[in-house]
Amino acid sequence: MKLKTLITIFCCLNVIISLAQDDVLTKEQITNDIEFLRNTLNEKSSYVYLNGYDFNTDFDTYLKKIGDSTTLEDFGLFLTQTLGKIGDRHSSMTTIRGFDLNESLFLPFIYAPLGDKVVVLNSDQDNELEIRNPQFPFLKKIDGTHIQDFLQKTRPEDITAPKQTYFTLAVRDIRDIEKNYRLLNKPLPKGIKLTLSDGNWQKDTVVVVPVVDRSERLRPWDEKFESQYLFVKDEDYNKPEIIEKLFNVEDGIAYIRLPEMADKEEAPLLFERFNSFMESIKDDSEALIIDVRSNGGGTRDLLYEFAKYMVHPDSIHVVNVTRQRGLIPLPEDYKQSLNNRFLYPMSELTERERTTVNAFLNTFEPIYELDDTKYSEYYFGLLNGKKLTGQSFYYDRPVYILANEKTFSAASIFVSVFKGLPNMTIVGATTDGSSGNSDWFDLPNSKLFGKISTMVSFQKDGKILDGFGTEPDIKIERDMDQILWKSDAQLEKLKSIIKGTN
């Protein structure tokens, strides 16, 4: 199920749950919930303490300061800020559910990320994007606070995300000014002073804008190619009119757009179309672009479907290494969950695969050494050409994977897996890496709920996915025309690189 579908379900659950909750929680209720969560994290979370952060200190400090009671909102925000520091991206992307901030006031305009700057936009009567003030296009300060300082405090759930991911998500949230001022612990004025600047921060102008209600707020900025699939459902990837738009060949360059990592059982027609497309470009293309920008993840089915064509039949590659947090030896349900992700222990590999894995381990240097009493043995993700190829063929032309800072979960694994393989080049921006194998938790008194990851997933270079992502081999950033939906500058520049004209 797609992340956006899950979020919709959670939002509905939030409404139902909030009706049955008290807005004020006693210290005893909070204490019991914190102890429950403390034990859950210590027993199940795969990322606790790895980055040096000790949540226990913040738990204890919070209990000392709240007095005899606190509000559900305050407790929910505290948990959001605290869990965000652990470095578990799957936990962060769903945040803590079950409380409502009752946001009703917003900043006007649309805010978009361009490099390390924030562009202030408007939309005209035809919903076309335009720069609000062409002479001063960039947002420099909000009520006297420099925009970089402001943003660092308004997205606590993503504080350990890769730098560009955090910036893009925080810029998107500038509009939500009532929430932001709550996080800043400042009263919200009726008018917000915005300092706008030119591109060099040399000339400024100040405008005071009123906050607006929900009916007047504008949609957050998204990429044009992303917005086209925001409301596409899982089952829609079985519709020919949706599928056909994802594949094309132009001037000898084949192109496949993947808005999500679809499940093979849920979208069999998409997989059929992919295979027929690969057959059609076998002898009639000079290169292939696979576009996973703003892909929020799903399953690894598409990864292994692509691998049938991308891995030489005589080769074996170790592409992912994981360790599962849990009882040792692992219970069967955890083993099955790992197998469903195409991850297997040494004992389940063939002799030739074990030889490849042992050679890989001789140079593998994981960023973290994990406790053998708490984490399983290594489970390996392999691309074995002989097992994969079947009735397919080896596509020996250059393949470019186009990613951005919103490439997440299974889509970020897709990028990480293929990075460094023959003929493969990663292009665009560093991904929002994540690989969690998550479990849900429900707090008994507040009824707040969320999820925590139970698996640590290493890339080939020893870094974990969460918090690091995968860097591109060729960095291509969006430009102002892409911000304004006038062109897809990243894709066009990549095509010119392939053609040797850039």
Image (cartoon, grey):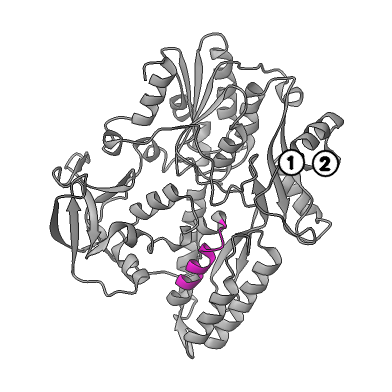
- Give the magenta range: 77-88
Q: Which residue is drawn at 51% across and 65% down?
A: 96
Name the image quarter holding residue 103: bottom left
- The residue positioned farthest toward the bottom in the image shown: 68
Residue hosting label 2: 346
| Residue 369, above or below 177 | above
In the picture, the disc for residue 317 is: none
Give amino acid for label 2: Met
Q: What percent of the width, then of the height, locates residue 415? A: 56, 36
In the picture, the quarter occupied by the C terminus is top left
| Residue 86, above or below 203 | below
| Residue 10, above or below 100 | above
* Mark-to-mark CA distance, 2 and 1: 8 Å
Q: How crowded is mark 2: few (under 14 residues within 10 Å), some or many (20 or more)?
A: some
Give amino acid for label 1: Phe
Pointers 2 and 1 in contact (C-beta within 8 Å): yes
Q: Which residue is drawn at 51% across and 63% down?
A: 84
Query: Of residues 72 and 118, which is closer to you in this image?
Result: 118
Q: What percent of the width, then of the height, locates residue 304? A: 65, 31
Residue hosting label 1: 380
